[in-house]
């Protein structure tokens, strides 16, 4: 059996279902490349009472470890929800192709935790991602998604590369908006949601440089008066 388990946002978020499946697993793996884990892996090991083996991107994407699930119970722990990342959906497809039995255990993720901002979840449009720029590689196509969402008055969740510090992320956002001739008054930045939540609503230049990873930006669309009141009181 292959168990794809969302850990939620903090070390106490594992569900009873998840703990039961982990207890019966011969191997417990941790996917550690799609997010900067906000707490020590050893804390999670104490919670589940088992040793955790970290799997780098190449091992997860090779999917070789899934074949062992034909003979053993294997659990892969994923920060947040189990199916938020495309890679994890592909793992389930691999199970189906190889006739490997599987369980999916859902949990909280940034996609729901952003409701702490007071912004209504059903008013969010497409989710965008900001990568870390290199010298000759500065993709800013995420602004196109922001424009699409704004055209229907929807909010945009902008996920930020885990390797990108807040100062550089702010600069990339400013430069990208300028390149696309898009003016944004204020944005929201959310840090360590569900662990030590910090939320700030302000102009990009005024956002704190002490924001810790993991963090994300939200570009608000048209605000309901209750949303606006909530943001102004953050």
Image (tube, rainbow, N blue to C red):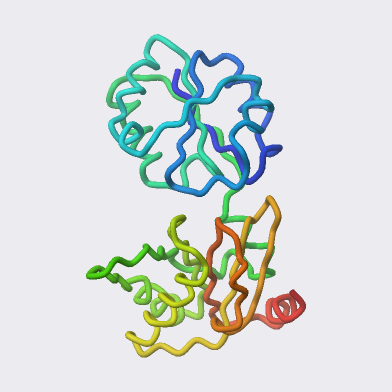
Q: Where the C terminus falls, by quadrant?
A: bottom right
40 to 160, vertically: above or below: above
Q: Residue furthest top?
A: 71
At which x and y percent is residue 196? 70, 55
At which x and y percent is residue 194? 68, 52
Q: For this view, does 27 lie left or right of residue 87?
A: right
How many marks on residues? Answer: 0
187 to 39, vertically: above or below: below
- Asked which quadrant contains residue 122, the reply is bottom right
- Asked which quadrant contains residue 97, the reply is top left
Q: Residue sitting at 26 percent across and 69 percent down?
A: 135
At which x and y percent is residue 214? 55, 56
At which x and y percent is residue 4? 48, 31
For the residue pair 21 and 132, the one nearer the viewer reads as 132
For the residue pair 136 and 27, the one nearer the viewer reads as 136
For the residue pair 198 and 209, the one nearer the viewer reads as 209
Q: Residue furthest left?
A: 136
Q: Where the N terminus falls, by quadrant?
A: top left
Q: Residue sitting at 37 percent across and 13 percent down?
A: 70
Q: For this view, does 36 lie left or right of residue 20?
A: left
Q: Residue sitting at 70 percent across and 77 percent down?
A: 231
Q: For this view, does 201 lie left or right of residue 79?
A: right
Q: Residue sitting at 62 percent across and 74 percent down?
A: 208
94 to 157, vertically: above or below: above
């Amino acid at each position: 059996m292959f168990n794809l388990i969302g850990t939620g946002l903090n070390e106490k978020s594992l569900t009873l279902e998840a703990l039961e499946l982990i207890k019966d697993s011969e191997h417990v793996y941790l996917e550690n490349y799609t997010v900067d884990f906000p707490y020590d892996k050893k804390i999670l090991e104490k919670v589940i009472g088992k040793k955790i083996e970290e799997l780098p991107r190449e091992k997860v994407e090779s999917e070789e470890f899934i074949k062992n699930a034909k003979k053993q119970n294997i659990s892969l722990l994923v920060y947040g929800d189990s199916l938020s990342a495309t890679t994890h959906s592909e793992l389930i497809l691999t199970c189906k192709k190889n006739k490997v039995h599987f369980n999916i255990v859902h949990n909280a993720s940034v996609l729901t935790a952003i409701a702490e901002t007071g912004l209504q979840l059903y008013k969010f449009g497409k989710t965008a991602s900001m990568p870390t720029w290199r010298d000759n590689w500065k993709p800013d196509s995420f602004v196109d998604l922001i424009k699409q969402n704004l055209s229907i008055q929807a909010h945009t969740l902008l996920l930020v590369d885990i390797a990108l510090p807040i100062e550089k992320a702010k600069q990339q956002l400013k430069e990208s908006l300028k390149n696309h001739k898009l003016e944004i008054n204020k944005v929201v930045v959310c840090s360590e949601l569900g662990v030590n939540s910090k939320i700030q609503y302000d102009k990009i230049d005024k956002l704190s440089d002490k924001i810790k990873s993991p963090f994300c930006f939200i570009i608000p669309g048209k605000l309901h008066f209750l949303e606006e009141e909530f943001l102004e009181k953050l």
